[in-house]
Image (cartoon, helix red, strand yellow):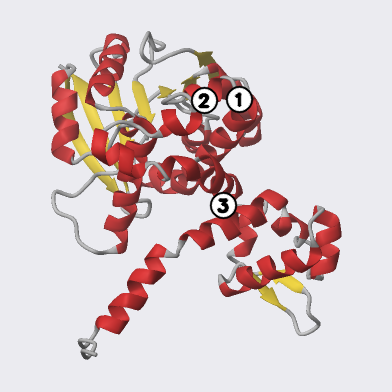
């Protein structure tokens, strides 16, 4: 038997860790969906107690809890009870910075789509249609439960970035800000909170707008924000001096992105600004955490929408083709996002 080359054992272990990592996604998703972190909010509980409260099989739940201990989501106390760690607290429904909905969305609704990644790679098409029965955002139109999980997950991800965006970009020069495709208004609410003299327009599809007002009321800005339901392929509200599109264009291929920008361009007056908040792909990638995050989101856009993350040059080309010129590019280092400011030409 030939000798194992130096370093191969470490490479094998690292590769198998990557291949087998899916178990972690499912363990965390199941814990979130069962509400285990919420049940542990008031302190440690035994596996049998948690099983009764969650309607699960006690011996099997104990195995899940042990797995969560290895992931630092829970810890096992000397008495055999289980408690949340600081990271596990982020799976509670009421936690500041909660990612519970994202864990459920990624581990359930997105899961089947990624199983068809090979189809997307071979055809360039989204795998959402064969996995969910319809492509794009179509599955949400007839499934209120899915729409609720999706919008809550998007609100969570936006919430993680809002403080950095508001601190990293100066919105004070704008008096009326339209958030196009803004979901429940998480980002717009933060922008208006930081700029008390400004008003806003939240624009999205009906399934998002219908549930947005409580979020804006919680932020204390509902009286300064107009809610408008519609499609950004048809028309967007006129009269704003800033048009904010966060993580919108990465959901769409170039043809649809140009259509969205063309619609927005019709509404943008001469002195108004377009603000794209997106991740920027580097021209060359390296095996580092930041680039792995970008690669994951890029492949997810392919799988879900036959879309993509883009480089700065690619965004400049889209904007130039639709009547805009870039006036500033502001990296928001704490979030991995960039604000691309553009003016109409």
Residue 97, numbered label? 3
Q: x%, y% of residue 200?
A: 48, 22
Q: Using the image, determine if residue 202 lies above or below residue 161.
A: above
Query: Where is mark 2, residue-wise?
Result: 139
- Marks 1 and 2 sit apart, C-alpha to C-alpha, by 6 Å
Residue of label 1? 143
Of 30 and 133, nearer the camera is 133
- Closer to the camera in the image, 310 or 16: 16
Point out the tag, 3 or 1, that comes first from the N-terminus: 3
x, y (%) of residue 302?
32, 37
Q: Is residue 223 left or right of residue 196?
A: right
What is the quadrant of residue 319 in the picture?
top left
Q: Is residue 304 visible to us here?
A: yes
Residue 101 picture quarter: top right
Q: Secondary structure at mark 1?
A: loop
Report which quarter residue 341 is drawn in: top left
């Amino acid at each position: 038997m030939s000798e194992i080359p130096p370093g191969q054992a470490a490479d094998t272990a690292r590769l198998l860790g990557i291949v087998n990592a899916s178990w972690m996604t499912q363990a965390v998703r199941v814990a979130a969906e069962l509400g285990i972190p919420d049940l542990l909010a008031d302190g440690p509980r035994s596996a049998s107690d948690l099983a009764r409260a969650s309607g699960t099989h006690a011996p099997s739940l104990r195995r899940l809890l042990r797995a969560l201990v290895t992931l630092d989501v829970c810890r096992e106390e000397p008495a055999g009870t289980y408690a949340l760690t600081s990271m596990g607290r982020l799976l509670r429904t009421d936690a500041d910075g909660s990612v519970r909905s994202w864990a459920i969305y990624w581990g359930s609704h997105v899961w089947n789509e990624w199983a068809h990644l090979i189809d997307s790679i071979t055809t360039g098409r989204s795998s959402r249609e064969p996995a969910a029965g319809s492509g794009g955002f179509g599955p949400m139109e007839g499934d209120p439960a899915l729409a609720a999980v999706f919008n809550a997950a998007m609100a969570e991800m936006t919430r993680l970035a809002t403080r950095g965006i508001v601190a990293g970009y100066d919105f004070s020069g704008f008096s009326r800000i339209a958030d196009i495709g803004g979901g429940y208004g998480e980002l717009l609410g933060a922008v208006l909170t930081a700029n008390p003299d400004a008003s806003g327009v939240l624009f999205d599809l009906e399934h998002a707008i219908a549930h947005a007002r409580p979020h804006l009321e919680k932020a204390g800005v509902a009286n300064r924000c107009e809610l408008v339901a519609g499609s950004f392929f048809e028309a967007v509200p006129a009269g704003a001096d800033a048009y904010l599109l966060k993580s919108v264009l990465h959901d769409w291929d170039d043809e649809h992105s140009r259509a969205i920008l063309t619609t927005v361009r019709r509404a943008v007056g001469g002195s108004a600004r377009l603000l794209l908040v997106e991740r920027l792909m580097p021209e060359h990638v390296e095996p580092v955490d930041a680039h792995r995050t970008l690669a994951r989101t890029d492949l997810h856009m392919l799988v879900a929408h036959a879309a993509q993350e883009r480089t700065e040059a690619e965004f400049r080309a889209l904007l130039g083709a639709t009547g805009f010129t870039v006036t500033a590019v502001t990296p928001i280092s704490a979030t991995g996002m960039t604000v691309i400011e553009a003016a109409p030409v």
